[in-house]
Amino acid sequence: MLREELPLLLETRARRPHRIAEVAAARPRRPALVGESGRLFIIAADHPARGALRIGDDPLAMSNRFDMLERLCTALARPGVDGVLGTADVLEDLLLLGALDGKLAIGSMNRGGLAGASFEIDDRFTGYDAKTISDMGFDGGKMLLRIDRNDPASVVTLDACAKAVGELADQKRMAMVEPFMSTRVDGKVKNILTTEACIHAIAIASGLGRTSAYTWLKVPVVDDMERVMASSTLPALLLGGEGGGDPDAAFERWSRALRLPTVRGLVVGRTLLYPPDGDVAKAVDTAAKLLPGQP
């Protein structure tokens, strides 16, 4: 179907850019952020805007946008998938393809910390802002918060994220914060995925902004998740990692963590969009079945 709709998408991009706002205004929306199950299953697709295109050993696995859109449309059409997280270019393509009808749309906000850059920890807000998210009829904004205690640039990102949390709350939109304690190893930013580091990161993220009423956390699955998730009362979604690993092991880790009371679902991208066997529908269906209330 994507191949048939692609010429119209490209023509609209070139000749009728105003259609994006028109389609957004007319888009059928969900009545509430969280449905009867109380769970969320979001497909993540904001990696390319940071130059993070790698899956496993392939450094350019996500470089073909047409292929990525086809995978996204397949994932969004599967039962149990609530929506997608992406930057403006991705969400607008999906809007024009009709793939966001009745789905949640979460705008990615800070993509300035380009993968591998010397300024990576200074994660400027180069994507969505809260007003545009609201104007487009989207449901929330996501921000990446990496904190390196040895890098003064971390405070720039902390300050920007705190302001964004408040601005999203003003619009009654979800603020999805993805926090990590980070460090540089051989010049590259690495997230510290120990139990203690994740507890510190969640504690810091939970206190950001002038209200936490609309804040959700996006967290990795690490050792001793019971202790990690006991560090905040905020609702949390599990992230999926970089992909390219053992999907069965990932599914098992998610299944265990989803039993914890504050864990409300999944935000997974590469692991499901680029599974080793290439079967996106199968990978998404397997993940969906992990969520209580799903068939």
Image (spheres, helix red, strand yellow):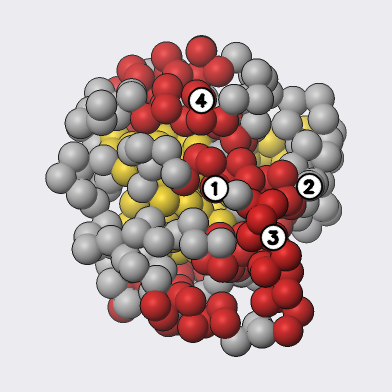
Vertical order, 182 against 32 (above or below): above
In the rendering, at what x and y percent does residue 266 appear?
A: 40, 37
Is residue 28 left or right of 76 when viewed as pictured? left
Chain-order first, disc 4 or disc 2: 2
In the rendering, at what x and y percent does residue 270 appear?
A: 61, 35
User: Distance between the Cα atoms at labels 2 and 3?
Assistant: 14 Å
Labels 4, 3: front one? 3
Instruction: Categorize mark 3 by other alpha carbons within 10 Å: few (<14), some (14-19), many (20+).
Output: some
Report the amino acid beneath label 2: Asn
Q: Which residue is mark 3?
A: 6
Labels 4, 1: front one? 1
Name the element at disc 1: helix
The quadrant the C terminus occupies is top left
Q: Are marks 2 and 3 in contact (CB under 8 Å)?
A: no
Chain-order first, disc 2 or disc 3: 3
Instruction: Categorize mark 4 by other alpha carbons within 10 Å: few (<14), some (14-19), many (20+).
Output: many
In the rendering, at what x and y percent does residue 186 appear?
A: 84, 33
Report the amino acid beneath label 4: Ala
Labels 1, 2: front one? 1
Total numbered badges shown on the rendered structure? 4
- For the point 15% across and 45% down, the residue is 36
Q: Which residue is mark 4?
A: 283
Q: Which residue is mark 2?
A: 64
Name the element at disc 4: helix
- Of 115 and 49, which appears nearest the observer? 49
Chain-order first, disc 4 or disc 1: 1
- For the point 57% across and 46% down, the residue is 72
Q: Which residue is mark 1?
A: 73
In the rendering, at what x and y percent does residue 133 appear?
A: 45, 73
Q: Are marks 4 and 2 in contact (CB under 8 Å)?
A: no
Q: Are marks 3 and 1 in contact (CB under 8 Å)?
A: no
